[in-house]
Image: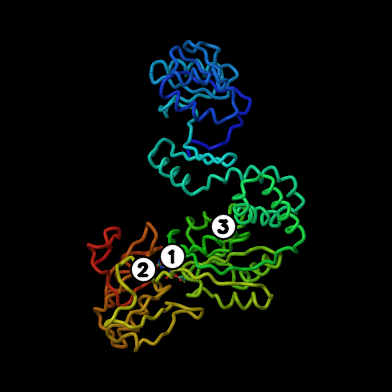
Amino acid sequence: MQHFPIFLAVAGRRITLSGGGDAALAKLRLLMKTEAHLNVFAADPASEIVNWANEGRLHLTRRALEPGDALCSALFYAANDDGAEDARVTRLAQADGALTNWVDNLENSQFITPAIVDRDPVTIAIGTEGAAPVLARAIKADLEARLPPTLGTLARIGKAFRKAADALPMGRKRRDFWADYYFDTGPQVIAEQSEAKITAALETLLSHHLSTAPRVGRVELVGAGPGDPELLTLKARRALDTADVVIHDRLVSPAILELARREATLIDAGKKGFGPAMAQSDICALMVEHAAQGAHVVRLKSGDPGVYGRLDEEIEALDAAGIDWNIVPGITSASAAAASIGQSLTKRDRNSAIRLLTGHDMKGLAEHDWRGLARAGEVAAIYMGLRGARFIQGRLLMHGAAPDTPITAVENASRPESRMVATTLSRLAADLEAAALTGPAILLYGLAPRSAASLPILKQEHA
Ligand code: SAH
């Protein structure tokens, strides 16, 4: 980050601007939304600026900027539409101790003005470090459309009510009250357009929140999907948005953890292959402990929590402790992997069933119905299958599977760094070893990529 976003207190302070043309007008329209004292220096100001000066909205001096003019200014804008003049006034303003912005000259500016969505007192600043003004404008337009114009009013009334709301204990109780106001009661009553009515509704709401017992904790067992944040369900997003505590597996991608509520406690219960991990009993104990204290706990698991997620052990622990829980399903990695190679998991006349297998279980390499799997046309998604690939290959060949049965390994399905290895049963172990996959990978037994040409974004490591 080369520019650090802050909100500067400018009410009652001086902001100086040099220039009287188009660039000056654009900046002044923005600056006049603030409560700062605006001083404009322009030898030949546009008529709008003259009018604003007459209305007392800014102070106009009809000459070019001179040394000392920017003294005591918090900010200075060089907006002359003239490079040489902007360079001169920027030097002068810096000598006067002001922080300077040279309009449309990123390199020579000490600060830049973001694109702004104004729902005062809610102000959203969008910056791209000058890299993509078009993008900033698109984001701004998107937010403008999405945020109701009444948002500012709600926030302003809410702000005036903050002292009263301090009657609620800090933390969750207070947050629940405000969430209720901003997302339920507020939008409902604001249609009435009367500030008194909204404040009355706030008072009713407050007494309601003051009288109710503390909320009991609960646990949501949530599927985070294969890694792409856009493959989260809306329910998963909402759960992350409101969680007090997020206990996540190592495979949950950082981009998804970014979406957790900022105040939420993140706990990494990383469980990877045979590596170091928090014991299952510790994870259960953690969930119970936090929920018992009244927290909204999100137990975040990669893919679908009901697929190799040890879900039942956690549910049993929660039931034993009498804690409420619910499951939010997610997209399992088999679905994401199949999608990435352009295949369906079931197909008429090929396989009417698909099996989910694990390469190893608690006891080590896992045994399966190899004979059944060896039949032509079978399809299976093998989770945690990399380490056991040689064993799986041996078992299937031994039970009569065709050596040229296609197998596709998809590593990091749905993530930007995804790779795939398209191989056959006879070459499985050798090809996987050569590819040296390091991320989570799933083996799609019986499936080949639809065609390399239709999968331009995947690097095909082995043919
Ligand atoms: N609940 C998860 C599976 C957990 S077991 C789900 O539904 O997907 C962990 C295994 O899942 C990994 O060893 C790997 O085989 C698979 N896996 C998880 N994320 C993956 C991804 N993004 N790409 C490929 N395989 C993945």
Q: Quadrant of residue 285?
A: bottom right
* Residue bearing the label numbered 1: 226
Q: Quadrant of residue 423?
A: bottom left
**Front tag of 3 and 1:** 3
Residue at 63% from the left image edge and 70% from the top image edge = 282
Mark closest to the chain's N terminus, 2 or 1:
1
* Residue bearing the label numbered 3: 241
Label placed on residue 341? none
The residue carrying mark 1 has its beta carbon less than 8 Å from ligand 1: yes
Residue 287, horizontal then vertical, whole percent: 64, 68
**On screen, 300 above or below 193?**
below
Distance between the Cα atoms at labels 3 and 2? 27 Å
Determine whether label 2 and label 1 are within 8 Å by CB.
yes
Determine whether the residue tagged by mark 2 lies in a helix, strand or loop: helix
Mark closest to the chain's N terminus, 3 or 1:
1
**On screen, 138 above or below 219?**
above
* Residue bearing the label numbered 2: 337
Question: What's the residue type where badge 1 is placed?
Answer: Pro
